Image (cartoon, rainbow, N blue to C red):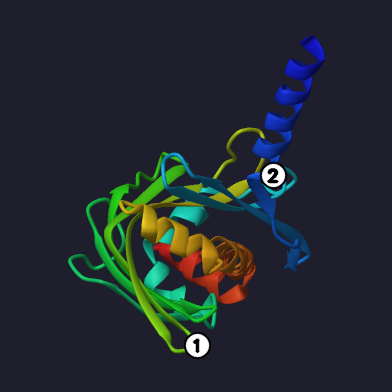
């Protein structure tokens, strides 16, 4: 009986570990960006994370400047980025509404974000999109999936894992939509995309154009 219980607990551990799926590492600006996703069948939730290693430390004020002015950089971070607009503010700040469209792996995401957490002194930024629509086509089959999306940016590390991280959570109301998202490889497609965004965002913050813009703002 004890042996059976041990094997049962071991099999449960293996299953839990299998839920965390890593994608290939990528190098940006001589820094490795790592990424993985997890799926939660019970709660119909997919979580994707892309992060720089602990050796990387980002300047908090520069990071906040980057996110406040993301409209200037968003379209350059990935070929998947199609549209980006702040619809009720001159720049991104708490309470700002953001509309953006991005396409990857045959899937198009249309977001309507609200910036619910952004403070210059806080290394945690949060966006929420209760109206995200995913559309795509597989062969002759077209589909539309609705979900709630939250995006958390951690500028100074989290869980002793990173120096900078993006965490994207997809919450599905429908079990059918959740199963479809997994079948269509949504977790893998958008985890790789998040990895690209983190890497290219980091490179942008090292660029002369960005540093000149930041320093000019400081000098004003």
**Image height of 208 relative to 171, above or below:** below
Q: Residue at x 37, y 76 (%)?
A: 143
Provide residue 23's location: percent of width, then percent of height.
70, 60
Q: Which residue is denoted by mark 1 in the rendering?
A: 139
- Considering every residue shown, the one lying at the far left of the view is 88
Viewer-nearest of discs 1 and 2:
1
The quadrant the N terminus occupies is top right
Provide residue 48's location: percent of width, then percent of height.
54, 53
**Separation of disc 1 and disc 2 at Cα?**
29 Å
* Near-viewer residue (69 or 161): 161
Q: Are there few (<14), some (14-19), or many (20+) residues within 10 Å of tag 2?
A: few
Q: Residue at x 70, y 49 (%)?
A: 56
Instruction: Give the side of residue 24 with respect to residue 108, left or right.
Output: right
Q: Can residue 137 be seen in this view?
A: yes
- Considering every residue shown, the one lying at the far bottom of the view is 140
Q: Which residue is denoted by mark 2 in the rendering?
A: 18
């Amino acid at each position: 009986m004890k042996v059976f219980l041990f094997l049962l607990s071991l099999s449960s551990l293996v299953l839990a570990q299998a839920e965390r799926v890593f994608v290939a590492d990528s190098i940006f600006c001589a820094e490795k960006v790592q990424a993985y996703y997890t799926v939660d069948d019970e709660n119909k939730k997919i979580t994707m994370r892309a992060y720089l290693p602990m050796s990387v430390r980002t300047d908090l004020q520069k990071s906040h400047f980057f996110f406040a002015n993301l409209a200037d950089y968003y379209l350059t971070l990935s070929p998947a980025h199609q549209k980006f607009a702040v619809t009720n503010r001159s720049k991104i700040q708490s309470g700002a509404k953001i509309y953006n469209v991005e396409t990857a792996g045959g899937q198009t995401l249309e977001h309507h974000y609200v910036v619910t957490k952004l403070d210059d002194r806080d290394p945690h930024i949060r966006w929420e999109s209760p109206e995200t629509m995913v559309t795509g086509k597989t062969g002759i089959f077209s589909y539309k999936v609705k979900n709630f999306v939250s995006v958390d940016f951690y500028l100074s590390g989290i869980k002793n894992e990173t120096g900078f991280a993006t965490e994207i959570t997809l919450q599905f109301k429908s079990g059918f939509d959740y199963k479809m998202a997994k079948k269509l490889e949504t977790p893998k497609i958008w985890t790789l995309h998040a990895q690209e965004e983190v890497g290219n965002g980091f490179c942008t913050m090292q660029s002369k154009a960005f540093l000149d813009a930041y320093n000019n703002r400081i000098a004003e």
